[in-house]
Image (spheres, helix red, strand yellow):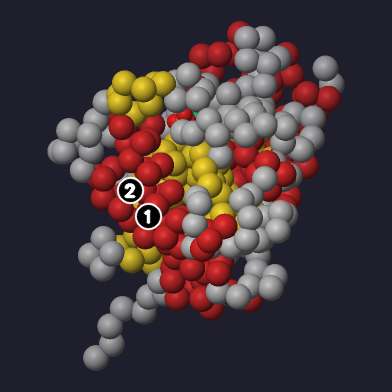
Amino acid sequence: MEGYKIKTLTQFIIERQADIPYATGEFTRLLYHIGVAAKVINKKVNKAGLVDILGAAGDINVQGEEQKKLDLFANWQLLQALKNSGECCGAASEEDQEVITWDDDLTQDGNYIFCMDPLDGSSNIDVNVSVGTIFSIYKRVSPRGEKPTMEDFLQEGSKQVAAGYIIYGSSTMLVYTTGKGVYGFTLDPSIGEFCLSNYNIITPLDGSYYSVNEGNFEHFPQGHKDYINYCKQIDKSTNRPYSARYIGSLVADFHRNLLKGGIFIYPQTASAPNGKLRLIYECNPIAFLAEQAGGKAIDGKQRILDIQPLSLHQRVPFIVGSKNMVEKLEDFLDSQ
Ligand code: AHG
Ligand code: MN
Ligand code: MN
């Protein structure tokens, strides 16, 4: 009698170890530990309403936003996983002003740098709407055996060796790339494993969803306003009007557009000249995934992955999604 044919995340990353140049198993161990942390965070997110972990922790994080308790929990859990893996020499997180390093020899010998938004879309937790974790991995440029330097953390997005996200949605999924395509794994809670569900994700070249916080419309640059109006015009030949979809969790908005085709826009405004989203742990990993799936990600002027980061919590305007849609918006921006 036959059972289920499944491929777990762990099996898959071991099989694909050769995708990472000079991989020795260190990277595989690192991803394995992230998968474990994701399962723990998933359990906590699912139980949020039950165990009274809802609500604000009473702290203000480095962006001055109110921190939710689950943000702190996810941050702690992931840092623990990184330390346990012994492969990561330092981490940067939305929840910590400074980089995190450890004093023991094992972690200082680690070859990888990890940047993360431990819980993305956390304002949605209280209302039971999808949230996520976003991560980005680099090889260190400083010598092993020492503490990492700022140069390790401020590498261009094009230097990422891996990036991904976990979406805690109607199902929990882990989606990642190592620069050889994008792969999605769905958590089967009955066996507690992430199982390969989306092999080599290719995003549609065109889509019919646009995702933007249109409440800010009046503050957007003219090119963005013109494009949003274009999205709403009636033209059957180009499938317009497009449908507006905005969850307010980057991970969830991006995930839908990745699979269905669409564009996500978070522009600059007069009061937020660099937009809201953070380059190193929100935009770079999402941009890497988008490009690997055949999509495109820009800040309005240049490719996100080419931006030289200047600080850990730097913000950038963000446009990401189906290639033709992003290029159409670029035309509107160029004509200004
Ligand atoms: P975080 O919860 O990590 O602070 O991120 C929230 C971000 C992102 O997920 C989302 O796309 C965006 O904020 C929504 O911002 P607005 O509420 O300004 O639209
Ligand atoms: Mn976020
Ligand atoms: Mn966050």
Work out whether residue 199 can be spotted. Answer: no
Q: Quadrant of the C terminus?
A: top right
| Depth check, front residue: 104 or 45 | 104
Quarter of the rendering containing residue 50: top left
| Depth check, front residue: 109 or 95 | 109
| Depth check, front residue: 97 or 232 | 97
| Depth check, front residue: 111 or 195 | 111
Residue at image position (64%, 29%) is: 314
**Residue that carries the numbered disc 1 in the rendered image:** 37
Q: Report crowding for label 1: few under 14, some 14 to 19, many 20 or more residues within 10 A (C-alpha).
A: many
Beta carbon of the mark 2 residue lies under 8 A of ligand 3 = no
Left or right side of 259 for 40 = left
Q: Quadrant of the N terminus?
A: bottom left
Q: Are marks 1 and 2 in contact (CB under 8 Å)?
A: yes
Q: Tally the numbered discs.
A: 2
Residue at image position (53%, 78%) is: 15
Q: Identify the secondary structure beneath mark 1.
A: helix
Residue 211 in the image: x percent, y percent? Answer: 54, 30
Tell me the kind of residue under disc 1: Ala
Residue at image position (62%, 39%) is: 280
Beta carbon of the mark 1 residue lies under 8 A of ligand 3 = no
Left or right side of 235 for 158 = right
Tell me the kind of residue under disc 2: Ile
**Residue that carries the numbered disc 2 in the rendered image:** 41
